[in-house]
Image (cartoon, coloured by chain):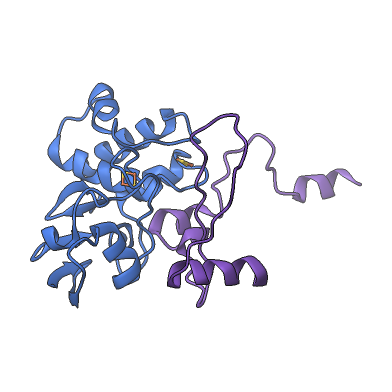
Amino acid sequence: MSATDLAARPNVVGTRMLRKEDPELLTGEARFVADLMVPGACHMAVLRSPYAHARIASVRLLSGPVHARRDRCLYRC
Amino acid sequence: MQVRMRVNGTEYVHEVEPRLLLVYYLREVVGLTGTNVGCDTSSCGACTVLLDGESVKSCTMLALQADGAEITTIEGLASPDGTLHPVQEAFRQNHALQCGYCTPGMVMAAVSLIREHPDLDEATVREGLEGNLCRCTGYHNIVKAVLAAASAMSAGVPA
Ligand code: FES
Ligand code: FES
């Protein structure tokens, strides 16, 4: 590469660059995962055991619309 | 119950459940997802918006409590022609954001802080933004940005 080619290249090393993503993040236009509204999306919640070390005695699936959907999610998603 | 408020200059009237939080009203009913939810429990400040010009954590109040109010969210801050508000511009110039999740709340809190304190100093910024958490930046550039915005605004950059 000749000296003239080098001179023509933008000099980015050591310069302050403005980030490309900032305008969107600063105006609320950026989309985070929580902002996506996908129709029919499954939701999940994790219920952690209050016991650090224990044996699972049984798992009981409750009925009702919320749980029915949960079952569907388990099998389909 | 019916709730009516102006959000970023537009009037909205909706039937909402009494238990609906203001932040979910803004995000899910009005559809403005710029206001983020970090904790849902008044700790992080990601959900900060302006209510009649003053910063509030919108996860800390019910939509119904904002009935009749004028709300400004991060989407309503820049001018219609796209020019950033001086606080937004200062955040950009001073690299005061990384992932940007805390940013809408930080910016709204800063706007209100600057309005309340014409002579802002570093200690006041740090104390004033105590309720806003950032996991990325380490806060120094945020403080720098807020001070820069304050001096730009007192020098007459239009807000
Ligand atoms: S989401 Fe409101 S303070 Fe964290
Ligand atoms: S920029 Fe990521 S949390 Fe503040």
Q: Nearer the viewer, residue B47 or A68?
A: A68
Does B133 appear above or below B57?
above
State the residue at coordinates (50%, 36%). Answer: B136
- From the image, which quarter does the N terminus of chain B lie in? bottom left
Marks counted in the figure total 0
State the residue at coordinates (54%, 66%). Answer: A70
Q: Which of A31 and B21 is in front in this view?
A: B21
* Residue B78 horizontal side relative to residue A50, left or right: left
Q: Nearer the viewer, residue A63 or B133?
A: A63
State the residue at coordinates (46%, 29%). Answer: B138
* Residue A16 horizontal side relative to residue B147, left or right: right
Which residue, as the protein is rendered here, is positioned at the far top?
B123
Does B96 appear above or below A41?
above
Which residue, as the protein is rendered here, is positioned at the far left?
B68
Q: Position of residue B140 (x, y in %)?
A: 42, 28
The chain whose colour is blue is: B
Q: Which of A25 and A71 is in front in this view?
A: A71
Q: Colour of chain A?
A: purple
Q: Where is residue B147 in the image (x, y as percent from the top left)?
A: 30, 33
Q: Where is residue B110 in the image (x, y as percent from the top left)?
A: 27, 41
Which residue, as the protein is rendered here, is positioned at the far front?
A57
**The quarter of the picture showing ligand 1:** top left
* Residue A22 horizontal side relative to residue B76, left or right: right
Q: Position of residue B121 (x, y in %)?
A: 24, 25
Does B134 appear above or below B12?
above
State the residue at coordinates (69%, 43%). Answer: A11
* Residue A27 horizontal side relative to residue B157, left or right: right
